Amino acid sequence: LSSLQSNLLPPRGEDAMGYTELSYLFTFIYPCFAGLFQSVNKAAELRTPYVSVPRAMLGAVLFTGIGLSLIVVAIAASAPRGELSETDFLLHAFPSKYVGLGGTVVVGIGSCVSCLDVAPTILRTIAASGHVPGAESLGLHLLSGRHSEPQRATAFTLLLAVPFAWLGGLEMVALIAAMLFLQMYLTMDVCCCLLASLRAPGWRPRFPNPKAFPLAPAAGAGAALCVVTFYMLSFKLAPLMLMAVV
């Protein structure tokens, strides 16, 4: 309990958290929420997507938030602040250091499997829509194999993703992943805000209730938070990612 009490408040003086430390914090925490859109990606396979997807999304956000909070509290209670360095805090995991190391490996593999499941499906859908020149000529829209899977899109995704694993720095890989996820969320928020504001005829979302929860202000607030998080992660990359969205 003494370690937990001493680690509850942010450090002060020379050890105070600066922009670099705050950027690292957001860089590593943000990808933990990457799997929240799994329910949306599987909406076509659900019997009642308008009911199941909102419940799954809200439940995932709540579960992930509580889980990360408990992990942070457990780390804070494991050792004094001076011993919780960037390189060895996992070694203080209870009851053994291998619990922390094994959990890190499992989370990493789970994130990779999740991305390999979602990214090829999205890539195949984009290729089938014909909006990206050359995608159909590469056969990225085709399904193959016994279970009709987007195998070509999966191979193309691997070719794009593997070079990032060779960058040599975990911080850079995590930063790029967080930026790309933020770019996707920002694009969706801007599109929802525009469609709701312009009252497009084909835009008829059933959740949330437009009368009880105006969608345009909520999507606009989400887009603004994405922009703020961009700059919290990296002042240098934020303008480039915003230009890509535009």
Image: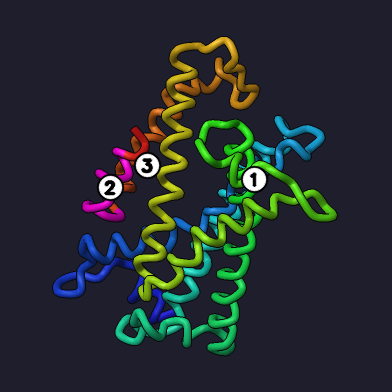
Q: Residue 145: which quarter of the image?
A: bottom right
| In-front residue for pair 145/11 | 145
Q: Which residues are magenta?
A: 233-243
Tell me the SS state at disc 3: helix
State the residue at coordinates (23%, 66%).
17
| In-front residue for pair 26/138 | 138
Could you classify mark 3 by the number of other residues whose Cα lies within 10 Å: few (under 14), some (14-19), or many (20 or more)?
many
* Percent coordinates x, y for residue 100 in the rendering: 54, 81
Residue beneath disc 3: 226
The figure's colour scheme reads: rainbow
Q: Quadrant of the N terminus?
A: bottom left
How many labels were placed on the picture? 3
Please tell me whether residue 169 belongs to the stretch shown in magenta: no
Q: Amino acid at mark 3?
A: Cys
Q: Amino acid at mark 1?
A: Gly
Q: Residue 203: which quarter of the image?
A: top right
State the residue at coordinates (38%, 58%).
176
Residue beneath disc 1: 139
Can you tell which mark lies on residue 238? 2
**Label whose residue precedes the other's in the sequence (3 or 2):** 3
